[in-house]
Image (cartoon, rainbow, N blue to C red):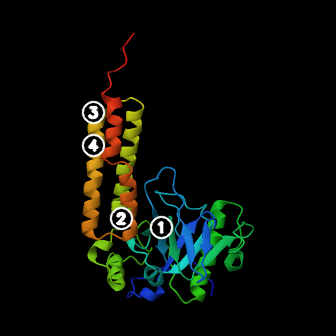
Amino acid sequence: MSHWPSYRQPEPLNLDSLRLVHARSDLNHVSLDAQGNAAIHNRPHERKPFENTMHFTLNAVVDSHAYGNFDRNHCVIISPLRETVALGNSPEGLLAADTYFHADANSNVTVPAPVMFAPEGMEVPRDLEPHVRRYPRGLTDEETHLFKKRAVGDWFDAEGLPFHNVGYDDWVGAADPQRGQKIQEELGFAENRYRGRHMHSPSYEFGGTMRHLYENLERLRSGERYVRDHWGRDENILEVIGENASYLQNFIQGREQAGDAPNAMAFYRKHAGEYDTARVAALTPAYHAPPPPTA
């Protein structure tokens, strides 16, 4: 029977019933291999060039909230959680509202047995067309989002799987603060695998530090010698860059000791290595050059 997402009290964890649900604006840059697995390309965000995580909800379609508008993400890719991890994907976060993985060296996350949805009339890659389930397109993005949610909910219902509304952290009406812990134990991961919200995660911390380092290097190239701190005080820009670079090296050592996923470590090393002390030193002569004479 067709229904909207259910409201349930917490139930015993059944890992085999959990499905990853990834919403995106289109199905471009999604490809199928010979085994039918879908390689989902993680397109870099212009405001987040130093983050490489792909995000999913569990048995739910993400709704817009204070931290993001997702109504235009008209396409959905569903895959089983256990089998996705078995392909070598190691989750960094395990919230019902935000389960996320580091993409591989090609910026892909590969998922098995994908079930794909797109609205009627949307162009999709020719090789994907036979595998895409269509749903009605609404007159607005908000209406299309509701049609999408109903179509996905009907699929879960037909498969005999639970489907929920999801809030900022968890399923609405069925919250379980221990769910992430239970999932990681069922998957066989150590305690340090569970990170919680993305904004508190190592990958988010890394992205922020890299952005600060990059911005300060650009200021140095343009001839700036000082930057303002949070309290409005001038700081020597070269010293700040050195602190950024040192922090990143310590960060990477800490993540290695914590046993972070190989994809995460490869991404950290690649980008931090581009801004090591040698590169900073190459800019030092320009910094120490005498300032131009004033008129």
First-in-chain label (3 vs 1): 1
> Tag 4: residue type?
Gly
Q: Which residue is mark 2?
A: 265
The quadrant in which residue 188 appears is bottom left
| Nearer the observer, 161 or 260 | 260
The residue carrying pointer 3 sits among few (fewer than 14), some (14 to 19) or many (20 or more) residues within 10 Å by Cα, namely few
Q: Which mark is residue 55?
A: 1
The percent position of residue 254, horizontal first and vertical second, equals: 25, 62
Q: Are the residues flagged by discs 1 and 4 in contact, CB closer than 8 Å?
A: no
- Measure the C-alpha gap from mark 4 to mark 2: 21 Å
89 on left or right of 280: right
Q: Is residue 69 above or below residue 90?
A: above
Closer to viewer: mark 3 or mark 1: 3
Which corner quadrant of the image does residue 279 belong to? top left
Q: Which corner quadrant holds the N terminus?
A: bottom right
Q: Residue at x 73, y 70 (%)?
A: 120
Of marks 3 and 4, the one in the foreground: 4
Mark 2 Cα within 10 Å, few/some/many (few <14, many 20+)? some
Q: Check the picture and name the quadrant holding the C terminus.
A: top left
Q: Which residue: 34% across, 50% down?
A: 209
Q: Earlier in the sequence, mark 1 or mark 4?
A: 1
Which badge, 2 or 1, is on the more N-terminal residue? 1
Amino acid type assigned to the residue bearing label 1 in the image: His
The earlier-in-sequence mark between 3 and 4 is 3
Amino acid type for the residue under numbered disc 3:
Asn
Q: Residue at x 49, y 60 (%)?
A: 65
Is residue 142 in view from this perspective? yes
